[in-house]
Amino acid sequence: QVQLVESGGGLVQAGGSLTLSCSASGSGFRINTWGWHRQAPGKERELVAQITSGGSVNYLDSVKGRFTISRENAKNTVAVQMNSLKPEDTAVYCCGAGWMTPVPGAGRSWGQGAQVTVSS
């Protein structure tokens, strides 16, 4: 199994910036795709940003130009730099990773979640 641990998050004023990081640990694994998801109260979870093993990225339309996802394969980490934050970005952010191992083969893990609160 692969475990994910997040760091970052917190309270920031509108227009400010935050960085969330996530690291993976385990044995014999390879991360294929990393993703950052968020869920605000009363709303469904949504995929905010995603990066593949080849470096291809996708962003939620509402965060394009403001958020940047990056990964360090050698360190098994991913980060999302969030700039020009808006109150509507307030949510619990969670990293997710699709991974491969010799056994059981493939799986998906989630971080514990980090609260991001943007005040107006």
Image (cartoon, rainbow, N blue to C red):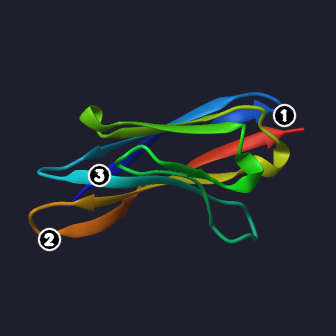
Which circle's residue, 2 or 1, is located before the other in the chain? 1
Residue at position x 25%, y 33% in the image:
74
Q: CA distance from mark 3 to mark 2?
A: 14 Å
Q: CA distance from mark 1 to mark 3?
A: 33 Å
The one nearer the camera, 51 or 92, is: 51
Residue 100: quadrant of the picture: bottom left
Task: State left or right for residue 50 relative to residue 108.
Answer: right
In terms of secondary structure, where does tag 1 sit? loop
Residue annotated with mark 3: 31
Residue annotated with mark 2: 104
- Identify which amino acid the numbered label 3 is placed on: Ile
Which circle's residue, 3 or 2, is located before the other in the chain? 3
Task: State left or right for residue 73 relative to residue 92.
Answer: left
Mark 2 crowd level (few <14, some 14–19, many ≥20, 10 Å Cα): few
Quadrant position of the N terminus in the picture: bottom left
Q: Residue 14 bears which disc, if any? A: 1
Residue at position x 72%, y 37% in the image:
66
Task: State left or right for residue 103 relative to residue 73.
Answer: left
